[in-house]
Image (tube, rainbow, N blue to C red):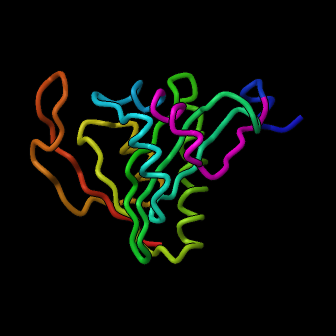
């Protein structure tokens, strides 16, 4: 029994490349985390592009979708478009594992800098990104619109 299984009672997560066949699952999960979720056709389009790089994390090879990360990559730069974990999987270190795997794959493709935008008030996401080595390089005032009004987006960068 692995340390992960003892800690989290279940199979160790499986991380693999995202495919267009994952689009419906990704859209369902994305809709749980964002004010305006992306549709399955939007995910299909992003994953079909040669610049789209995505990874999914499942509970075992055929298990439940735990999370995903999707970037647009044109080496030497990339931009994380979205990263989502299902509610029950948050706070267990899985996002860090998924992000580390994703960044490693981007680096293997020749990416040397990763950018992303995050809502200024999203403390859990900011903590994740800072642990992963991202630093603030800009701010977009009133960029996000949500149920509580407009909020700023922070632009973060990580060099490899």
Relative horizontal placement of residue 51, taking residue 17 as reference (left or right): left
Which image quarter is the N terminus in? top right
How far from the left and from the top, in percent, is residue 141?
A: 10, 47
- Is 19 or 135 nearer to us in this picture? 19
x then y, percent, for residue 135: 33, 60
Q: Position of residue 126 (x, y in %)?
A: 36, 45
Which residue: 59% across, 73% down? 108
Q: How many marks?
A: 0
- Vertical order, 77 against 143 (above or below): below
User: Residue at (15%, 37%) from the top-left corner?
Assistant: 151
Q: Nearer the viewer, residue 21 or 79?
A: 21
Image coords of residue 55 (percent x, y): 58, 50
Left or right relative to 4: residue 64: left
Q: Image quadrant of residue 41? A: top left
Q: Residue at x 19, y 60 (%)?
A: 138
Is 16 within the magenta? yes
Taking the image as shown, residue 122 lies to the left or right of residue 7, namely left
Whether residue 27 appears in magenta in the rendering, the answer is yes
Residue at image coords 41%, 24% = 32
Residue situated furthest right in the rendering: 1
Q: Please determine whether, in this image, residue 72 is positioned above or below residue 39.
A: below
Tell me if 106 is positioned left or right of 36 in this view: right
Residues 131 and 56: in front is: 56
Task: Identify whether 81 is placed above or below 106.
Answer: above
- The span picked out in magenta is 11-28
């Amino acid at each position: 029994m692995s340390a992960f299984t003892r800690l989290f009672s279940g199979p160790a997560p499986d991380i693999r490349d995202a495919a267009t066949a994952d689009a419906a699952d990704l859209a369902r999960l994305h809709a749980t985390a964002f004010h305006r979720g992306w549709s399955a056709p939007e995910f299909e389009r992003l994953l079909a592009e040669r610049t789209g790089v995505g990874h999914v994390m499942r509970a075992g090879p055929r298990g439940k979708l735990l999370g995903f990360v999707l970037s647009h990559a044109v080496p030497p730069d990339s931009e994380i478009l979205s990263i989502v974990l299902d509610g029950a999987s948050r706070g267990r270190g899985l996002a860090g594992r998924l992000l580390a795997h994703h960044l490693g794959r981007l680096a293997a493709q020749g990416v040397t800098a990763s950018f992303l935008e995050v809502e200024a008030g999203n403390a859990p996401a900011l903590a994740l990104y800072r642990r992963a080595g991202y630093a603030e390089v800009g701010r977009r005032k009133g960029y996000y619109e949500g149920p509580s009004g407009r909020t700023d987006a922070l632009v973060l960068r990580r060099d490899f």
